[in-house]
Amino acid sequence: MGKLIVVPTPIGNLKDITLRALEVLKEADLILAEDTRQTAKLLRHYEIATPTRSYHQHNEHKVTDAIVDQLKADITYALVSDAGTPAISDPGFLLVRACTEANIEVECLPGATAFVPALVKSGIPCDQFLYLGFLPQKKGRQTRMQEIAEETRTMVCYESPHRLMKALDQLQEFCGPDRLISVSREISKLHEETLTKPVSELIAHFTETPPRGEFVMVISGKT
């Protein structure tokens, strides 16, 4: 049997990758990449010549079985996403599940995940938290907001700059203007920024300063 190794990649600064991850990327027989063009930048930077193949949300249902069949031979595939840890709001879960069902060894390296630094530096309690991924865009969004309003644990979710204001407006509607929320953007990049304020103050801030970059929101629980 072969092996699938899940490899976290930098979410911003290219130095945010472990020596072990670089070793795996060099020695793997193939790298399965969410976007081969994005992964190529990382591989060029570290002079890694391992071949890549696309594995993303638009083809994973079609190619997962074939990849599992290939992994039944004595080979090693590395799985990467564009940034961070695969399967955390990125493609990867289907392949990992299929491999475990086929008794193919799966290894996951520790490494970058955007919500962890955002949570830690938010100043909001992080001894217990609920990870929500991306908020539903349409179906189920009202229900999710109602759940957030009643949840007592800290919650973490991702949001795009185009939908951030809508999310903040709805959080104020359901949770009230004083609910404490932390928003972090461009983590580990040049323009990294974190703001921890009542939701009403965040709305005022982003009304004056249009949001840019990908955001992690840390929402305090109901008290």
Image (spheres, helix red, strand yellow):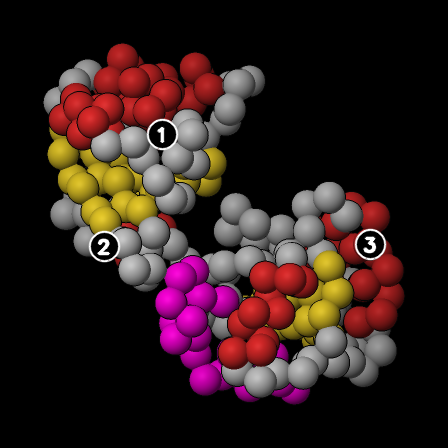
Callouts 2 and 1 close, C-beta under 8 Å: no
In the structure shown, which secondary structural element does the residue marked by tag 1 occupy? Answer: helix
Q: Is residue 149 visible?
A: no
In this picture, residue 35 sits left or right of residue 188 = right
Q: Which mark is residue 78?
A: none
Q: Is residue 26 a member of the stretch shown in magenta? A: yes
Q: In the rendering, at what x and y percent does residue 42 appear?
A: 54, 72
In the structure shown, which secondary structural element does the residue marked by tag 3 occupy? Answer: helix
Residue beneath label 2, please?
120
Residue beneath label 3, please?
63
Disc 3: CA contacts within 10 A as few (<14), some (14-19) or many (>=20) = some
In this picture, residue 201 sits left or right of residue 3 = left
Residue beneath label 1, please?
164
Mark 2 vs 3, N-terminal side = 3
Q: Nearer the viewer, residue 77 or 150?
A: 77
Callouts 3 and 1 close, C-beta under 8 Å: no
Q: In the rendering, at what x and y percent does residue 103 appear?
A: 74, 67
Q: Compute the Cα span from label 2 to label 1.
A: 21 Å
Which quarter of the figure has residue 4?
A: bottom right
Q: Quadrant of the C terminus?
A: top left
Q: Nearer the viewer, residue 52 or 114?
A: 52
Q: Is residue 15 a member of the stretch shown in magenta? A: yes
